[in-house]
Amino acid sequence: MIRFEHVGKRYDGGFEALRDLDFELARGEMAFLTGPSGAGKSTLLRLIALLERPSRGHIRVADIDLSRLRRRHIPYLRRRVGMIFQDHLLLHDRTVFDNVALPLIINGVVDHRDVSRRVRAALDKVGLLGREKYFPVTLSGGEQQRVGIARAVVTRPPILLADEPTGNLDPALSAEIMQLFVEFNRVGVTTLIASHDLALVGSLGFRRIGLEDGRVVIDHAGVAA
């Protein structure tokens, strides 16, 4: 589902965020990206969603060669990739319903009944059904992260990416959020999560891809529970 072939990313000024990455994530697989701050985890995820382009090498996502993908086709790729960020990136002047519905509106879903049904289904999956009319400021940090997850899965993407989704949460909430990702993976969603919480990652038993100085230094398969 995701394939990196000798991928590098160099920024202006000469900083190399990624160096000769070569790995593959199978369809329906779940894995964790680990490593210290600055190791390249966020950059790697951004390349998959084409929020940035690599400086060299090739990336294939869902059988699409990203190096050949024209700018006007990028939105079609992103419909297949759900992305979750540590700081949620919610619109605080919009309700929970409007935040979750946004990807559907962007994708051109105009049937209000279909939008409502899919938003409610996504909120139900993350345990927030009944919070549709709330504003993000009234929710806890864990609830805001769940809204971000609902927004990412409302379009039913086959790929789910998460960048430090539990970084601001306490251990109990972190475990709950990670369990949501496990449940999405169990129904076939290819899932890649950047996390610095090695204890939590280890307890889940999935493959761990460790980065250091932009290179893969660990690639352990793990045994999922």
Image (cartoon, rainbow, N blue to C red):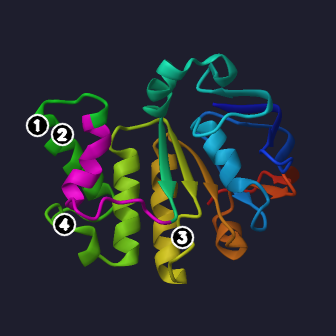
Circle 1 residues within 10 Å: few <14, some 14–19, many ≥20: few
Q: Which mark is residue 115?
A: 2
Instruction: Determine the secondary structure under disc 3.
Output: loop
Q: Quadrant of the C terminus?
A: bottom right
Inspect the image, locate mark 1, and give the three-letter code of the amino acid beneath it.
Answer: His
Q: Residue furthest left?
A: 113
Whole-percent x and y of residue 171?
55, 82
Instruction: Determine the secondary structure under disc 1.
Output: helix
Q: Are marks 1 and 2 in contact (CB under 8 Å)?
A: yes
Q: Is residue 86 above or below residue 58?
A: below
Instruction: Determine the secondary structure under disc 4.
Output: loop
Cα separation, mark 4 vs mark 2, equals 16 Å
Query: On the image, numbered disc 1 is attached to which residue?
Result: 112
Q: Is residue 33 above or below residue 80?
A: below
Whole-percent x and y of residue 106?
30, 34
Q: Residue at 69% across / 49% down in the picture?
A: 43
Closest to the observer: 34 or 182? Answer: 34
Q: Residue at 38% across / 46% down in the picture?
A: 153
Cα separation, mark 4 vs mark 1, equals 18 Å
Q: Which mark is residue 131?
A: 4
Q: Earlier in the sequence, mark 3 or mark 1?
A: 1
Cα separation, mark 3 vs mark 2, equals 28 Å
Cα separation, mark 3 vs mark 4, equals 21 Å
Residue 98 painted magenta: yes
